[in-house]
Image (cartoon, coloured by chain):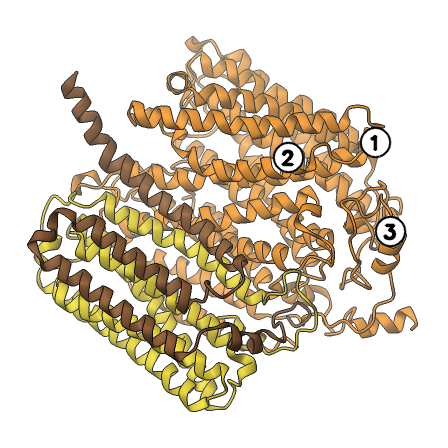
Chain colours: A yellow, B orange, C brown
C-alpha cells in the first residue's frame, strides 16, 4: 500500500524499460503471491479424502450459495475495471461510483464467507475438527484476509477520490489496486473449481 | 558550481539528521547495506561461538561439557543463525551496497521498503535470540522436522520461537527480493543492457527471484506449524490423518532454492574478483549468465534429494537423482570458466583473489560430495551422518563464507575509501583455509564410519575420538582467523592506506565513482557502451560523468516509519507467545496504523 | 522516492489509449458470468460426471486467462509484466502438480506394481 503517496511525486528520471517502477514491483510481488496460494492449494489437494472423521466436504459445502458469492466477486472485478476506466478518463463520478461498488461487492463476498463459516461451525466443522476443516479454513481464510485488505485499500482510494485527489494523472494508483483485486479474484476462480466443484 | 555548494544542493545531509537518528531513519541503500553487513557479522560471531561450543563438546568421547538439551539448542541456533541471520543478510548487504553502483542507479527501486526489510530482519533476529534469555532456544534442528516440532513432542516455547521467528525473517526476505528484482529491471543506467550487467548483479537477480518464489512456500509451511502448535489444527499430526512428510516437502521446496540463495551471491563475487586480478575479461560471460540462471531454475526441481530416506519410491528417487546430477553440469561449467579466466592471465594474488581461488577449490570438493549423495542408494548410507555435515560445510563455509570474505576484501576500499591490510589478510586467509579443511575434511571419514549428526556425544568404541579432536583444533584455528578478520576490518577502517576510486583497476561501474561514493552515487549517470566500461573505450567519459559535480538531485528523505512498521510486524508474531488468541490482533492493529502512515508519507 | 522513477510521467496518459474501454470490460464480464453458470450447470448434470475434472479445469483456466489478459491488461501491456508474473506462476502450478503426483499418483502406481510383482 506504499503506492498511495509515492506515485504522484514527479518522477523525472527515465527507467531502463520505460515502464513504471511501482507497477513492475507490484507484478513481481503478485508473482510471489502465486507461490503462497500455490502451496496452500497443494496442501488442500494432498489432504483431500485424508480426514479420518467427518464432516466431509460433500456434507457441508453449499454450491448454490458459493456460486452466488463467486458471481459477486466476478462482478466486483468488472466494477474495478469500470472504476479504472472512469478515473483514467477523468470521469470523477463514474470512477467514484464504481470504486465504491467494488468495496461493496467485496464486502458482500466477505459477508457470504462469514455466513458460510458460521454455517459450517453449526454443522460441527471447525479449524480443529479434521484435516478438511484445517485445510479448508486456512486456505479460504487467507483468501478472505486478502479480500479484506483489498476492501480497506479500495475504501482508502474512494476517500481520496471524494477529496478530489484522484485525477487522471494518478490513475496508476487505482490500476495497481485493481491488479491486486483481480489477483484475489483469479485465486478464487481456482479455489471455486478445485475445492467446491471438484469434490 | 562549487563542490561544497553542489553537495548541499545535492543533499549531502539535506534532511539535517546525523548520528544514531540518521542510521535509524536512513533510506540510503549504502547505509542500509552497512547496517545489514554489521548485523550479519555480529551474527557470524554468535553462530561461530555456538559452533565452537559444539566442537568443544565433541572434542573427546563421552564428554559432558554441555548437556544434551543445551547441545540441541546450540546446533539448532547455529544452523538458523548461519543460514538466516548471517548467510542471507550478508549477501543482501553486498547486494544493497554494490548492485545500485554496478548498474548506475542512485538507489534501489523502493528505498523505504529496503529500510523496512532491514528492520524486520533485525527484529526477527532479536526475537529468535531472545529465546536464549529464557533458556528455551529452538532445539529441533534448523529444518525443524514435524512431528517432532509439534506441541506434544516439543511442549516448551522453543519451537514457537522457531516457527514465529522464521516467519518474521521470511517477510523481510520476500520484500528484499521484490525490491532487487525491480531495481535490476528498472534502474539500469542508459546502455546497461541485461547482457552487459556484471555477473554479481546477475547473480543478485537470480537470487532475488529465488527469494520471491521460495520464501512464500516456507511461509505456508510455517503457518501450518504455527496453527498446529497454537490453535490445535492437524496439518502434520498423523493421529488425525496429517502427514509429517508434507512438512519435509514444503520445507525442502524452500530449502533447496535456499541453498542456491546462499551460494549464488558467492558465485557472483568470485566472477568479479577473478577477472579483476587476472587482468582478463570473464571467460564465457554469456555462458556464466545462463548457467547461473539454469542453476536457479533447476534448483527448484531437486528438493526431494534431501528426503531419500523417507522412502519416496523408485520413480521419485530416480527423478530426483537425475535432476540433482543435472544441476552439477551448469555448476561445473562455472568452475571451468573461472579457471579459463585465470588461464594465461596476469595473476595477482591479493587477499581477495586468494579467497576466490580458495573458494573454487573448497566448493569443488563440496560439490563432488554433493554428487555422491545425489545417488539415492549411496545417500541412504550417508544420510544423517557427519558425511552430510562435511558436504554442506564445504559448500557453505568453503563456498559462501570464503566468497563473502573475498567480496569484503575486494569492496572494502570502495565502501570506506581505505585499503585493507594485506599482511593481516593473508594470515586470515591461510589460517581460515587450513582451519576449515582441518575441521571439515575428517568429517567425511567420521561420517562414513557411522557417527550420526545432531547427537551430543559419542562412544569411545566408535574410534573417532582422534579425528574429532583434530576437527575441534581446526575449528579453533578458524576462530582465530575470524578474530584477525574483525581486527583487520577495524584497523583498516581507522588507519588503512587511502584507496582512490579504483585501487584494483577493475572494470565495472562501481569503481568509476569516488570511494566512498557520495549519497547520490554518480554526479551524472554514466552511459554504458560495453561490458567493461572502465577497461574499454569511453572509460574517461564514464569516470568524468560519475565524479562530476552534481546538479540538483532529489534524494528520498529519511523516514522512521520503516522501523516502526517492522516493530509492529515483529510484535504481532511475538504476541502469539502469550497464547491469548486476540493478543496478536493488537500487534496487527498497530502494524496497520504504521502501514497507513508509511503509505501516505510524503517522499518529496 | 521521487528520485527513482516511481511515476513515469506519461503512463497514465498512455494507459487510456492502451487499455480497452468500458464496452470490452462489460463483454468480458458477461462471458465470465456465462462460464461460471456453465461450470455450476456441469456440476449438477450427472451425465457430465465422467468428464467433470477436465471440463471444469478447462473452464476455470479460461476464466483465469480472460481476467489476466483483459482486466489485468496483460494482453495490452508490456510483455515484461507477463514475464515477471508468469515465471513464478509456472513454478506455483508445478508445485501443485508435483505434490499431487507425489502424494496422490505415485503411491497408487507403486501399490499396483507391487501387486503385479
For residue B538, the mark is 3
Q: Are marks 2 and 1 on the same chain?
A: yes
**Nearer to me, B83 or B540:** B540
Quick check: can you spot residue B550? yes
Q: Confirm or deny contact between disc 2 and disc 1 (CB under 8 A).
A: no
Disc 2: host chain: B
Residue A70 % position (x, y): 24, 68
- The correct choice, above or below, for C20 with respect to B139 in the image is below
Going from N to C along the chain, the mark reached first, 2 or 3, is 2
| SS at badge 2 | helix
Residue B543 % position (x, y): 86, 54
Task: Report the residue marked by disc 1.
Answer: B423
Quick check: can you spot residue B218? no
Residue B233 % position (x, y): 23, 50
Whether residue B160 sits left or right of residue B354 in the image: it is left
Task: Report the residue marked by disc 2.
Answer: B287
Q: Residues within 10 Å of mark 2 (few under 14, many from 20)?
A: some
Q: Residues within 10 Å of mark 1 (few under 14, many from 20)?
A: few
Amino acid at each position: 500500500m506504499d503506492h498511495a503517496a509515492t506515485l504522484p511525486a514527479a518522477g523525472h528520471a527515465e527507467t531502463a524499460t520505460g515502464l513504471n517502477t511501482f507497477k513492475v514491483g507490484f507484478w513481481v510481488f503478485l508473482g510471489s503471491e502465486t507461490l503462497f496460494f500455490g502451496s496452500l492449494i497443494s496442501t488442500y489437494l494432498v489432504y483431500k479424502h485424508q480426514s479420518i472423521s467427518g464432516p466431509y466436504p460433500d456434507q457441508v459445502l453449499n454450491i448454490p450459495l458459493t456460486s452466488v458469492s463467486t458471481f459477486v466477486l466476478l462482478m466486483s472485478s468488472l466494477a474495478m475495471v469500470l472504476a479504472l476506466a472512469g478515473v483514467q478518463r477523468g470521469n470523477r463520478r463514474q470512477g467514484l461510483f464504481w470504486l465504491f461498488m467494488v468495496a461493496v461487492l467485496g464486502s458482500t463476498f466477505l459477508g457470504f464467507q462469514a455466513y458460510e463459516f458460521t454455517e459450517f461451525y453449526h454443522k460441527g466443522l471447525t479449524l480443529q475438527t479434521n484435516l478438511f476443516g484445517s485445510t479448508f479454513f486456512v486456505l479460504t481464510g487467507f483468501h478472505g484476509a486478502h479480500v479484506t485488505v483489498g476492501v480497506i485499500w479500495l475504501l482508502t482510494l474512494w476517500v481520496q477520490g471524494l477529496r478530489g485527489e484522484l485525477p487522471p494523472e494518478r490513475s496508476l494508483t487505482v490500476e495497481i489496486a485493481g491488479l491486486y483485486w483481480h489477483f484475489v479474484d483469479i485465486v478464487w476462480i481456482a479455489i471455486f473449481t478445485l475445492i467446491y466443484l471438484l469434490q | 558550481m562549487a563542490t561544497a555548494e553542489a553537495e548541499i544542493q545535492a543533499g549531502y545531509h539535506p534532511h539535517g539528521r546525523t548520528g544514531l537518528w540518521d542510521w535509524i531513519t536512513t533510506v540510503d541503500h549504502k547505509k542500509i547495506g552497512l547496517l545489514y553487513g554489521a548485523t550479519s557479522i555480529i551474527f557470524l560471531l554468535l553462530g561461530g561461538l555456538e559452533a565452537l561450543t559444539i566442537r568443544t563438546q565433541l572434542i573427546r568421547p563421552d564428554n559432558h561439557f554441555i548437556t544434551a538439551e543445551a547441545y540441541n539448542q546450540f546446533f539448532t541456533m547455529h544452523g538458523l543463525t548461519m543460514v538466516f541471520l548471517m548467510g542471507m543478510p550478508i549477501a543482501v548487504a553486498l547486494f544493497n551496497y554494490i548492485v545500485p553502483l554496478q548498474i548506475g542507479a542512485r538507489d534501489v527501486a523502493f528505498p523505504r521498503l529496503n529500510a523496512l526489510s532491514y528492520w524486520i530482519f533485525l527484529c526477527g533476529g532479536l526475537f529468535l535470540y531472545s529465546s536464549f534469555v529464557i533458556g528455551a532456544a529452538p532445539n529441533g534442528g534448523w529444518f525443524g522436522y514435524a512431528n517432532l516440532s509439534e506441541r506434544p513432542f516439543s511442549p516448551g516455547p522453543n519451537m514457537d520461537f522457531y516457527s514465529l521467528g522464521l516467519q518474521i525473517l521470511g517477510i523481510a526476505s520476500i520484500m528484499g527480493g521484490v525490491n532487487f528484482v525491480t531495481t535490476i529491471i528498472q534502474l539500469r543506467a542508459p546502455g546497461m543492457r541485461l547482457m552487459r550487467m556484471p555477473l554479481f548483479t546477475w547473480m543478485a537477480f537470480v537470487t532475488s527471484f529465488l527469494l520471491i518464489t521460495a520464501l512464500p512456500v516456507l511461509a505456508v509451511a510455517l503457518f501450518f506449524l504455527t496453527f498446529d502448535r497454537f490453535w490445535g489444527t492437524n496439518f502434520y499430526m498423523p493421529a488425525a490423518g496429517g502427514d509429517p512428510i508434507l512438512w519435509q516437502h514444503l520445507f525442502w521446496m524452500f530449502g533447496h532454492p535456499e541453498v542456491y540463495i546462499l551460494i549464488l551471491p558467492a558465485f557472483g563475487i568470485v566472477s568479479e574478483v577473478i577477472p579483476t586480478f587476472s587482468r582478463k575479461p570473464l571467460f564465457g560471460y554469456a555462458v556464466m549468465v545462463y548457467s547461473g540462471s539454469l542453476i536457479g531454475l533447476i534448483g527448484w526441481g531437486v528438493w526431494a534429494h534431501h528426503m531419500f530416506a523417507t522412502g519416496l519410491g523408485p520413480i521419485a528417487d530416480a527423478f530426483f537423482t537425475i535432476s540433482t546430477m543435472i544441476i552439477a553440469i551448469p555448476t561445473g561449467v562455472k568452475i571451468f570458466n573461472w579457471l579459463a579466466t585465470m588461464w594465461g592471465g596476469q595473476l595477482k594474488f591479493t587477499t581477495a583473489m586468494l579467497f576466490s581461488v580458495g573458494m573454487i577449490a573448497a566448493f569443488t570438493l563440496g560439490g563432488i560430495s554433493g554428487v555422491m549423495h545425489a545417488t539415492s542408494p549411496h545417500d541412504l548410507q550417508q544420510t544423517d551422518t557427519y558425511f552430510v555435515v562435511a558436504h554442506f560445510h564445504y559448500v557453505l563455509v568453503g563456498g559462501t563464507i570464503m566468497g563473502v570474505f573475498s567480496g569484503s576484501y575486494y569492496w572494502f576500499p570502495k565502501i570506506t575509501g581505505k585499503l585493507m591490510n594485506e599482511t593481516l589478510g593473508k594470515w586470515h586467509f591461510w589460517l581460515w583455509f587450513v582451519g576449515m579443511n582441518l575441521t571439515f575434511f575428517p568429517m567425511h571419514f567420521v561420517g562414513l564410519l557411522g557417527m550420526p549428526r545432531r547427537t551430543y556425544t559419542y562412544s569411545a568404541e566408535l574410534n573417532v575420538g582422534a579425528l574429532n579432536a583434530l576437527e575441534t583444533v581446526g575449528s579453533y584455528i578458524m576462530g582465530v582467523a575470524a578474530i584477525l578478520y574483525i581486527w583487520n576490518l577495524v584497523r583498516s577502517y581507522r588507519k588503512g592506506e587511502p584507496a582512490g576510486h579504483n585501487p584494483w583497476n577493475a572494470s565495472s561501474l562501481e569503481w568509476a565513482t569516488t570511494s566512498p561514493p557520495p549519497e547520490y552515487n554518480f554526479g551524472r549517470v554514466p552511459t554504458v557502451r560495453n561490458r567493461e566500461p572502465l577497461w574499454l573505450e569511453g572509460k574517461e567519459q564514464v569516470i568524468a560523468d560519475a565524479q562530476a559535480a552534481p546538479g540538483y538531485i532529489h534524494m528520498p528523505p529519511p523516514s522512521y516509519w520503516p522501523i516502526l512498521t517492522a516493530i509492529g510486524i515483529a510484535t504481532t508474531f511475538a504476541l502469539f507467545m502469550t497464547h491469548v488468541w486476540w493478543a496478536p490482533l493488537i500487534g496487527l492493529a498497530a502494524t496497520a496504523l504504521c502501514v497507513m502512515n508509511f503509505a501516505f508519507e510524503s517522499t518529496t | 522516492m521521487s528520485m527513482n522513477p516511481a511515476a513515469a510521467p506519461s503512463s497514465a496518459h498512455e494507459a487510456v489509449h492502451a487499455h480497452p474501454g468500458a464496452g470490452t470490460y462489460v463483454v468480458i464480464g458477461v462471458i465470465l458470468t456465462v462460464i461460471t453458470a456453465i461450470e455450476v450447470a456441469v456440476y449438477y448434470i450427472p451425465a457430465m460426471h465422467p468428464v467433470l475434472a477436465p471440463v471444469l479445469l478447462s473452464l476455470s483456466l479460461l476464466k483465469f486467462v480472460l481476467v489476466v489478459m483483459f482486466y489485468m491488461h496483460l494482453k495490452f501491456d508490456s510483455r515484461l509484466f507477463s514475464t515477471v508474473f508468469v515465471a513464478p506462476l509456472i513454478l506455483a502450478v508445478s508445485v501443485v502438480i508435483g505434490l499431487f503426483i507425489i502424494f496422490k499418483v505415485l503411491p497408487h502406481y507403486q501399490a499396483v506394481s507391487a501387486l503385479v510383482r
